[in-house]
Image (cartoon, helix red, strand yellow):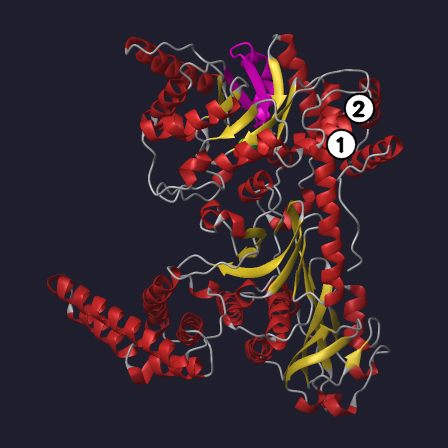
Amino acid sequence: MESMLNSLRSIVQEVSAARDLPKVLAIIVSRVKRAMHTQVCSVYLRGPKGDYVLMATDGLQQQAVERVRLAPGQGLVGRVVAREEPVNVEDAESHPAFRYFPETGEEHFNSFLGVPIIHHRQVLGVLVVQQSERRRFDEGDEAFLVTMSAQLAGVIAHAEATGTMVAIGAAAVQARFVGVSGAPGIAIGESVVVAPLADLTGVPYQQCEDIEAELMFFQRCLSAVRNDIKALGVQLEERLNREERALFDAYLAMLDDAALGAEVVTKIRQGTCAPYAWSEVILEHENNFADMDDAYLRERATDVRDLGRRVLAYLQESNQSCKIYPDHTILIGDELTASMLGEVPENKLAGLVSVQGSGNSHVAILARAMGIPTVMGVVDLPHTRMDGRPVIVDGYKGTVYSNPGVQLRKQYQAVAKEEQKLVKGLEALRDLPCETLDKYRLPLWVNTGLMADVVRSLEHGAEGVGLYRTEVPFLLRDRFPTEEEQRLIYRDQLRAFAPHTVTMRTLDVGGDKALPYFPIEEDNPFLGWRGIRVTLDHPDIFLAQIRAMIRASIGLDNLRILLPMISSISELEQSKALIHRAYHELVEEGCEVNLPPIGVMIEVPAAVYQARELAARVDFLSVGSNDLTQYLLAVDRNNARVANQYQAFHPAVLRALQQVVHDGHTQGVSVGICGELAGDPGAAILLMAMGYDVLSMNATNLPKVKSVIRAITLAQAEALLDDVMPLVEAEQVCARIDQMLLEVGVNRVVRPLEVDA
Ligand code: PEP
Ligand code: MG
């Protein structure tokens, strides 16, 4: 058992480090064959025509590779595909489904076990083992192969996609990758890949133009690391035993020109940039060590990796300063962060693509606020091979095209033009009130975080700020801002919107929002130390922020304070006590200022059930539907794998929303919503009918919501709400909303022309 688990782990590790499909498949067939003590292991993959092609084998004749093809249902392999489950037969030849291909030399092998390789519910291929003596593979074999296949499916899919990229090189062949929508809009531009520094597996592939200069640069970085290691060795000399000192010598030896260095030099000479060449060599060596039977040598894999990171840090650091962003930059990363966006000059940033994350990740919310078309969760995107390519981002559909052909490019240019026209049309609504045909007024506010949003919000006709995410300015720094620094930032916000209200939320970090200078490492960050839990444990941070907010509001008097992630009455009481303390201190210091209204966010199920008790103790409630949805449905808002299950229109969510507004109103407080749901035109109708007093959303969506509200009557909205509340599935709710919008003649997504790509 232990050894099976070890084989599994080491095969998966080795396969994951390989960088192209032929290597991936070669490792799989040889290692699985060895681990299972069989005579044949082969992989079949789905070809472009939907048939399954023998792509690699260890045991059958090599000439059969890429020649043997089976349609679903055809032969034993096709049977695995059609049934989507293992086929295990003792005597393959006598099986009615058997098909014989003379080029394989298969006639010697009687036993056959094939399991499907399934990725995203699709059969990507079939993994087969065969053996000459007539016996059934036992249950253990079957379980092993099924486990292997489940773990390898993602790696194979990724390698296939990367293969497309490598094969096409600079010569354009269009490829399409699917994710989820992060922010609507179309962007056409050139990709720039960003990766966390010193991450060996994430180094973007780049070609180098001046080979001699690259070689010199590489040697300089190597000698810098050599010096570091020598200096470290001297520093620690007293504290190290002989063995440990030997490690330093081993490091130095590895950096020797004849060792790792030489392999890298060869790759650079072939035109690969130094950071990528270095990471490739290191990953290969690390794997060789990790694969060794001897425990001491296996441990050396860690040393190779450590050394690899040290050199990579130098190689990347020196490259950083000269990073050039093209005019229409499409920023691509494994996991984009707010600060990565911050590094691109604003007028150059056209679109965003993130391999990780989903539509409700904070980076997507930020992108929506900034109006930058974004696609999230493109899990199969070979991002390290994407640097410098022409790319189209379709933020409506959640798709990304690399190397788009002339035809597609033209179609998307037309869409982008149409989009501009649409936006222009909506701009005309700016100074018109947000009211229904029968004159029911519904204030539309905005969510902000950056100063850039302020301008856009005012241009879009916002009547206030329902959520100012104070963590955004915190995220863009390398230390906590001081009280005075915060005061200045908050003052800008308050002044820009005065006399309209600005609702400032106290620091909401944790979950997927980590401050670089205040890391929180947890197994379950969304259920951990986040939001108010952090700031109540750090009254110093909380008090400084409250003081800064209140001081910023002097003379403007348009501040409201909002508390995130409240899950109990005592958290609210403690927060209020601190706010009162800060306020009284300021008054004692001579500030002439009013105590701002205080509200809580309803974003945890516990708060839904205590909305009445919370409302009795505050001035307003504001529903954070982004978190509320994730906690009600137990779906991580950030996880691309379950993005389809994150259903904002789930009947359970709608019921909670209705209950909160009802309970809040029984206590006479205003109830608003500041989650992304409020910015969906269809949802806005339901929320208005439920009685929400204010909807707060990203600036981009505000005109779209206004146009829809202005096209209907309150009675129509209430009828729609009556229709959807008894429905049991989110899809039914969406279908009913779409039908209604069609009847009144508006397009819910307010999306321009379709592209038939
Ligand atoms: C929410 O959870 O709905 C919300 C508005 O807060 P955030 O998205 O910043 O977590
Ligand atoms: Mg939240």
Left or right position of 541 against 720: left
Return the residue nearer the eye: 691 or 254: 691
Numbered-mark total: 2
Residue furthest to the right: 743
Out of 91 and 512, give the one closest to the viewer. 512
**Percent position (x, y) of residue 522?**
43, 43
Say what amino acid the circle numbered 2 marks.
Leu
Q: What is the three-letter code of the residue carrying label 1?
A: Gly
Disc number for residue 721? 2
**For the residue with label 1, is its CB less than 8 Å from the closest atom of ligand 1?**
no
Report the magenta residues as a range: 598-623
Q: Nearer the viewer, residue 358 or 460?
A: 460
Is 150 part of what is drawn in magenta?
no
As helix, strand or loop, the secondary structure at mark 2 comes to helix
Quarter containing the C terminus: bottom right
Residue 747's place in the image compared with 563, above or below, is: below
Cα distance in 3D space between marks 2 and 1: 11 Å
Pointer 2: residues within 10 angstroms few (<14), some, or many (20+)? many
> Mark 1 sits on what residue?
682
Q: Is residue 191 left or right of residue 109?
A: left
Residue 280 placement: quadrant: bottom left
List x then y, in percent, for residue 57: 65, 83
Secondary structure of the residue carrying tag 1 is: helix
Q: Would you place residue 206 above or below residue 722 in this image?
A: below
Is the residue at mark 2 in contact range of ligand 1, meaning its CB lies under 8 Å from it? Answer: no
- Residue found 36% across the figure and 20% down from its top: 547
Residue 298 appearing in the image: yes
